[in-house]
Amino acid sequence: MSLRSAEHYLSSLADGRRLYYRGERVDDLLAVPDLRVAAEHAAIDYRVADDPTHRDLAVVKDPDSGEEYSAYYRVPRTPEDLLERSRLIELCTSLGGTMVTLIKEIGSDALFALQRVLEGEELARAESFLERCRHEDLAVAVAQTDVKGDRSRPPHLQDDRDLYVRVVEERADGIVVRGAKCHTSVAANADELIVLPTRAMGAEDADHAVAFAVPVATEGLSLYISSFSGGERDPWDFPLSSRHRMLETLTVFDDVFVPWDRVFLCRRPELAGPVALTFVEYHRFTAVSYKLPLLDALVGAAAVIADMNGVARAGHIREKLTQLVIFAETVRGLTELAAQRARVDERGIAYPDPMTTNLAKYTFATRYHQALELVQDCAGGLLVTGPGAEDWASDEVRPVLEKYYGAAAPASDRLRVMNLISDLTVRDFGGYHAVLAVHAEGSIEAEKMQILRSYDAEPRVALARRLAGLD
């Protein structure tokens, strides 16, 4: 099959998957306007391959078979491969109004990790599944974060063992799993779901050391979609969130059967930690790549609204814009450096430098909320006191708004930019971004731990000892 159209992708979602939204069972995802917005947004990953402007970046040709396939499923072999992957992620996120599409990005992150960690039959299964994703141009989500329960206890000491996904039965033809994962992005509108361990595990946690892939429309698999950022939105009030949304689910496995050819790990606690960490090496690189359009939008919007407000030459505004530029370009520079410093393992698979990737993610996460303050300061109070779409559409009210909300730019332009900044920084779309900044792809503490773990202190210690005359 290879490349699918966006329409083919969207039609594939009507497969009987078990979805719940706002307390009710959903039979047709595309029939619910809130959910269709997310599916149409995800389809950007398919539309970009049809666009001649972007095709060279989005599509790869197999040198042996001549088959064309999504560049997301190209196993990176060089730093340039990783740079091109980052550019593709940035492009699709920019087309998505600063919201990452993620339906191929995260699945391929997981598959690259599995190919680096697994061996033997388990590796062969992961390679076969990657080939299937590539050939059928599948949308693939990842469920990694278990609901965890009492976080002071490991999986096997939880009062309810189902708080971490676990194997409850091994059969000749496969395994049966039970439990739940949370914060599962894009699963509701994906074709397949890859399940990975969330943490390192000991021998007592063996039942929970499991990794596999299942179709989203699998018996016993239920997805409970978060209603956050739902509801009807006027494009004038909500220029971004009316057209772009990502769905998050509580993902419940109620004795789900998984055939052996889809099982990548089964009761292998010694591999749970390596799989989890290797996935993060790729996924945090994906994360900082998709943050770049958001940072560019904040810089651009602050500059535009400052000019429209007539304060662009004020010293304190120029200082705020300078700080925003420093922030955005520092994250961009570290992201590119993470690819340029890429390492290649013994199997010839390239991966971004872990320390630099985590430096980029840490820099973004710890300075993001300060950046929001700077943008809001450049904009002013109209972000929350301005008129709504109904006011602007009113023949009686609009002339008043045009008279009194004009500044160094017409009110029509100024209010549109205010609404853009509100969507990015004040409303629930902005709140979603703000929470992702802190928690998505790992916490700030996890990033600090990885930075220290990845840093090679030995040559620096040797330098200090030599300079001090100790050696």
Image (tube, rainbow, N blue to C red):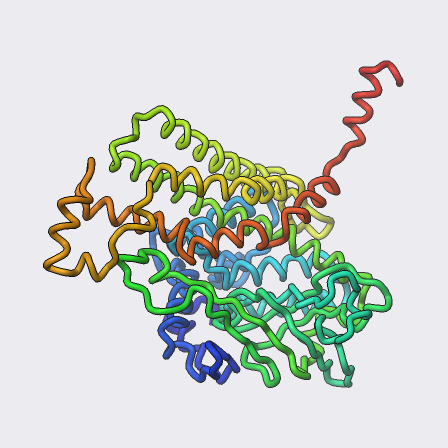
Q: In this view, does 200 lie above or below 149?
A: above
Q: Residue at x 30, y 39 (%)?
A: 305
Report which quarter residue 181 is drawn in: bottom right
Residue 155 falls left or right of residue 224: right
Q: Residue at x 41, y 68 (%)?
A: 230
> Is 340 in front, or is 220?
220
Q: Is residue 392 something one can see in this rendering?
A: yes
Q: Position of residue 255 (x, y in %)?
A: 68, 84
Residue 398 falls left or right of residue 311: left
Residue 402 falls left or right of residue 180: left
Is the C terminus in the top left, top right, bottom left or bottom right quadrant?
top right
Q: In this view, does 62 lie above or below 383?
A: below
Q: Is residue 121 something one can see in this rendering?
A: no
Q: In this view, does 66 lie above or below 181?
A: above
> Is 248 in front, or is 286?
248
Residue 140 falls left or right of residue 468: left
Q: Farthest residue in the right direction?
A: 471
Q: Which residue is drawn at 30% across and 26% down?
A: 313
